[in-house]
Amino acid sequence: MSSANSNLDMFFKPKTVAVVGVSSQTRKFGHVIFKNFMESNINAKIYPVNPKIDNILGYKCYKSILDIPEPLDLVVIAISRKAVLNVMEECAQKKVRGVIIIAGGFSEIGPEGKKLEDEILKIGSEKNIRIIGPNVIGIYDPYYGVDTLFLPRYRLMRPKRGKISFISQSGAFGSALLDFAASQGVGISKYVSIGNAIDVDVIDVLEYLESDENTNCIMVYIEGLRTKKEKTKNFYNVIKRISLKKPIIILKGGLTEQGQKAAASHTGSISSQIDILKAVFKQTNVIQADDALQLFDMARMLSSSHFPTGRRIAIITNAGGFGVLTTDQLVKQGFDLTTLSKETVEFLKSKMPNEVIISNPTDLIGDSDTERYKIALNKILEDNNVDIVILIILLSLSFVESDIIDVIHAARIKYKKPIVVCTIGGQFTQMMVKMMEENEIPTFPNPKRTVNAVKALIHYAEFCIGREEVCYPLDR
Amino acid sequence: MSSANSNLDMFFKPKTVAVVGVSSQTRKFGHVIFKNFMESNINAKIYPVNPKIDNILGYKCYKSILDIPEPLDLVVIAISRKAVLNVMEECAQKKVRGVIIIAGGFSEIGPEGKKLEDEILKIGSEKNIRIIGPNVIGIYDPYYGVDTLFLPRYRLMRPKRGKISFISQSGAFGSALLDFAASQGVGISKYVSIGNAIDVDVIDVLEYLESDENTNCIMVYIEGLRTKKEKTKNFYNVIKRISLKKPIIILKGGLTEQGQKAAASHTGSISSQIDILKAVFKQTNVIQADDALQLFDMARMLSSSHFPTGRRIAIITNAGGFGVLTTDQLVKQGFDLTTLSKETVEFLKSKMPNEVIISNPTDLIGDSDTERYKIALNKILEDNNVDIVILIILLSLSFVESDIIDVIHAARIKYKKPIVVCTIGGQFTQMMVKMMEENEIPTFPNPKRTVNAVKALIHYAEFCIGREEVCYPLDR
């Protein structure tokens, strides 16, 4: 059950939006943000604000939000920190419901900045204005069309609609990962850069995402909690509750003493939280990533895969070497290869050329085409000894074409068991990988990342099995 | 000193080449291989051989190599295994110097195949014909233009000329990595797929590469040694000698029992070698990779970077979060961050905006442009407390343009210290990464891979420092 406090619809579903600080210089943050709203076909009225210009990109420009002829759900403040307080006062007067403060230079730079933050928060609390920021990129939601990422789209790609939501304390890191996701064909539900989090913090966003129907997996980058003390106490209960509904994957920056020192000057996070957080993660089924790409890998895996009912893994490959390396990685990370049933082996032997090795790994060898993969994949998924299939397809050295995607897609629907693809290569392969990701087939470039992701999937599923409160969609 | 036996010029610098098994079907191996020779502008005469056709792609096709009117340095045998022995006999008659046997289905499938291998090798030994294969992709050398990779270039990209050579026991894995290298802008000197290695084996190729002026770093994928007993004894001395001249990075497939089982059916490698090999690597300065991408990362790093004279690392970033994560990874992997000299800090403070954090990491913050990077990079490289710089540049969220490449390039020449770039993002970033790699600036997508590669560089340099026999080019 999420609290009333967690309703953040003013940010994600605003009917009226103003962008304060719209400039005619195309590279200024305010300009890009306003253009983003224009281009995203959002179902909301949008108003540019700048006292110095009359119109921008065909829109009438207002001197102040007070001049806008209707109530405002959301105000994006894209001006330097010194002018923010004044706009906040206008927001209070106008009874605005939510503001996003882009500018940095607040508590992260010292006491003077902290004082400014406190004054802003005071207005917010008194007048019931929810605040995201300061020191943020803000939010991105491809479903509703809110996009405050202040870099142009030719430079920072926007991912398509998907099921992964992403909360990041670091705007730059978060946005770069979003850009990367877009280039890989991976979709996103919501992205929230929480920055200094003087009001809306990671707990608020988690609670909002808990009931968001477009989110089935949440990834989080945090350096420290940055939340009020009474909420810190609640953190344990909130993430335990949510992580049984939707996988939560957390990358914690500053897990070492030197890393914490760096974090302190970055977002002002406090070092003593390390041990508490680690303990909380362990007890609440939260998945800990230990690197940026691992965060992304685990999220792709947990968002798009079926959940396994066991940990018996089979490998199918067209490249013996990659089969060997994947076996090594599985064993190193604590897994065994399953033994295929006698029936499976006999059936496949009767269907395959002599050179093919029907075992685990099953090596379809280099001249395998899509049809050979189809026969092997379906028969092995049907095998009761198999819970998960790792499908290695080195595309640059094979006769497999893009119809392999149809084969995998059909097998997913039929058998409802996790199928993970491992492949590496150049342009041709990368194009195919993008197509696979666009069709929600999780794909990894090397055995290590493949096995890491499989491990996260297995651990999450094992934690959830048999618990009544779990409600992940098994047949999604 | 390399032995006379290690002269493999017949493969890499042939003056006359025949491809046996050229087909008019464009997807057949022989067709693709012959076309590769045509397209690579090799400075050699090339002859297609197929008794059933008269000409192919404008070339007269010969019934047999015996009909070719001049001696042959190299014969590529691209026909099925059953016909290989016959062609080998013709090669003996013709006094051919080297053959590459593409077909599989030899010792890796059992005693019958082993017998065939033995007969082929007997002819080779008696008639002094060097053999690569069977069960191989063969070789690729962009300098001289030998290319027997039997997949078309639209499907499997060919890397440009570079300084990394690559020996792989698995043709498919090796080729996929080559394809990947090409797409990333990474150059290659020579690629040799050694397959069943009945004659030319990993030791022969290592010795050949030892004196190859186009090679400054060697990466190797092996599952087992697959060499004659007397040569196994020599392995230790050979790799110890070479690895002090040129870094050797080895990925060993089958490091676990189950992995070995898989390897046995892949290349027939023998499990008992694991412990011996591990011990040998440790004592000989060979760098061990534990995954496909790590192999590639370490090779890029050791091929293109200066060598550090110490392990004092400085981080420069435009994204605090990535600075924190990289610090965490460094500490986890056993390194400390260096302390910048007072003079460096004071100088940079006088040149930078207030919000910039001059420390280690130095956070140039999100609005940094190339100029700010230039000032920081040069000053920090000048600092006597700094041996290595990790340069984090999140390009999608910055004002850094492609002129950053000029800045890094100039700083490398001036200071001769390792500079490593860490960046992640979408199309724009990936384009920039490719440009950096093409200019030999090693670039990694996440803190973990960055630190892994830095670690390999430091360990290799530390092993070499002070040894007379070391002759790596410090100012390359």
Image (cartoon, coloured by chain):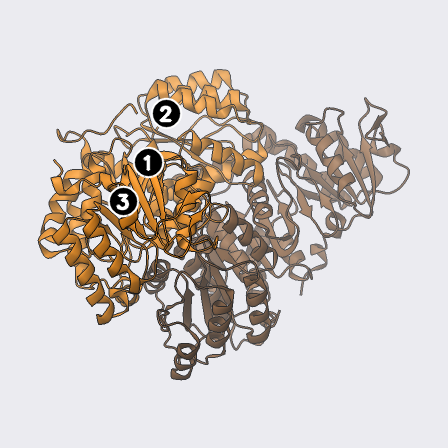
Chain colours: A orange, B brown
Secondary structure beneath disc 2?
Answer: loop
Callout 3: chain? A
User: Do the residues indicated by labels 3 and 1 lie within the same chain of the protein?
Assistant: yes
Q: Residue at x 48, y 35 (%)?
A: A434
x%, y% of residue B237? 56, 62
- Quadrant of the rendered structure where residue B212 is? bottom right
Mark nearer the N terminus (3 vs 1): 1
x%, y% of residue B42? 79, 46
Q: CA distance from mark 1 to mark 2?
A: 56 Å
State which mark lies toward you, 1 or 2.
1
Image disc number at residue A340: 2
Q: CA distance from mark 3 to mark 1?
A: 10 Å
Q: CA distance from mark 2 to mark 3?
A: 58 Å
Image disc number at residue A44: 1
Callout 1: chain? A
Pick whichever, A399 or B160, lies toward us.
Answer: B160
Asked if the residues shown at circle 2 and circle 3 are in contact, with their CB atoms under 8 angstroms apart, the answer is no
Q: Residue at x 45, y 25 (%)?
A: A358
Pick whichever, B342 or B76, lies toward us.
Answer: B342
Residue B132 lies, with reference to residue A432, above or below; the image says below
> The residue under label 1 is which amino acid type?
Ala
Mark nearer the N terminus (1 vs 2): 1
Residue A70 is at least partly visible in this image: yes
Image disc number at residue A74: 3
Callout 2: chain? A
Residue B90 lies, with reference to residue A5, above or below; the image says above
